[in-house]
Image (cartoon, rainbow, N blue to C red):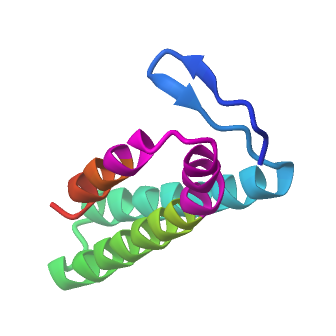
Amino acid sequence: MSDKDVHGCCGKTTARSEEERKKLIHRLNRMEGQIRGIRGMVEKDAYCEDILIQSAAVNAAVSAFNKELIASHIRGCVARDIREGRDEVIDEFVATLQKLMK
């Protein structure tokens, strides 16, 4: 993880290794495919329970993506900011977790 967080349109950005970026993109591509599959099921009037099972799989995939990103954020950005005396990152992260847990 690079020490440079760059200010972008929405605040900070995070420099990621090529491996981490590829892993996250791969997960997102799989989720995108799952969503397309669900749309196809709806278009073909698939049975509701079958659609719900696929929807639950997407929710699990999003949850796994979030867990991976949270772990990376804590190990990288949060730990670095705390070491550098920027304790406000703790409140920022707590607020993010509260949004995720709604």
Left or right, 87 with reference to 6:
left
Dominant secondary structure, magenta = helix
Which residue is most to the top?
A: 9
Q: Position of residue 37 (x, y in %)?
A: 43, 64
Tell whether 79 sits left or right of 37.
right
Residue 78: horizontal and vertical position, in percent? 54, 52
Q: Residue furthest right?
A: 18
Closest to the observer, 11 or 38? 11
**Residue 18 lies in magenta, yes or no?**
no
Task: Pick whichever, 96 or 44, lies toward us.
Answer: 96
**What is the count of numbered marks?**
0
Residue 84, compared with residue 29, is above or below; it is: above
State the residue at coordinates (39%, 51%). 90
Which of 82 and 11 lies nearest the eye of the viewer? 82
- Residue at horizontal 23 percent and vertical 77 percent from the top: 52
Position of residue 84 in the picture relative to residue 74 (left or right): right
- x and y percentages locating residue 64 in the rendered image: 48, 73
- Tell me which residue sits at (75%, 57%) in the image: 20
Q: Position of residue 87 (x, y in %)?
A: 44, 45
Q: Residue at x 63, y 50 (%)?
A: 83
Start-end of magenta stretch? 72-92
